[in-house]
Image (cartoon, rainbow, N blue to C red):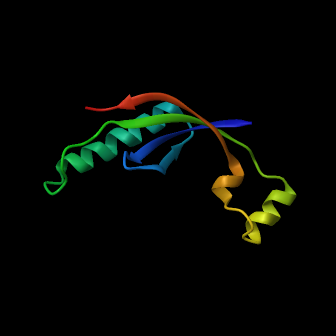
Amino acid sequence: MKKLYAYQISPLNPSLLFYAETLEDCRAAALAQRAELRDDKNFGPLEPMAIFEIEVEIPGRETLLSVLNRDIDLTDAVLGKRRFIEMVED
């Protein structure tokens, strides 16, 4: 099982995540998005963004066929346990 990292793009939608290979890359991407949002005068106050460590399983043949045949969603097929790591804020 491989581990990836993801930050929660919006606190209002816990399933909307951005994925990265390392914690450092994930943190950097979250900080970059926060900088862009801060520059947008139409955007309100920024809530902290949660970073998670996520277990990922490479699908086998049967799972891949189920994904291709639209029986299951790819995200559901490969993502496993999610563990909170930290909050990113300015």
User: Hey, which residue is sitting farthest front in the picture?
Assistant: 12
Q: In the visual, does 23 lie left or right of 80? A: left
Q: In which quarter of the image is the C terminus?
A: top left
- Closer to the camera, 10 or 30? 10
- Closer to the camera, 33 or 70? 70
Residue for point 81% across, 58% down? 63
42 lies above or below 4: below
Give the percent coordinates (x, y) of residue 15.
50, 50
User: Hey, which residue is sitting farthest left in the picture?
Assistant: 41
Quarter residue 29 falls in: top left
Residue for point 38% across, 30% down? 87
Give the percent coordinates (x, y) of residue 16.
47, 52
Q: In which quarter of the image is the N terminus?
A: top right
User: Hey, which residue is sitting farthest bottom in the picture?
Assistant: 69
Quarter residue 22 falls in: top right
Residue for point 74% across, 64% down? 67
Give the percent coordinates (x, y) of residue 5.
54, 37
Give the percent coordinates (x, y) of residue 4.
60, 38
12 lies above or below 49: below
Q: In the visual, does 66 lie left or right of 84? A: right
8 lies above or below 86: below
- Closer to the camera, 51 or 15? 15
Quarter residue 70 falls in: bottom right
User: Hey, which residue is sitting farthest top in the picture?
Assistant: 86
Residue for point 15% across, 57% down? 42
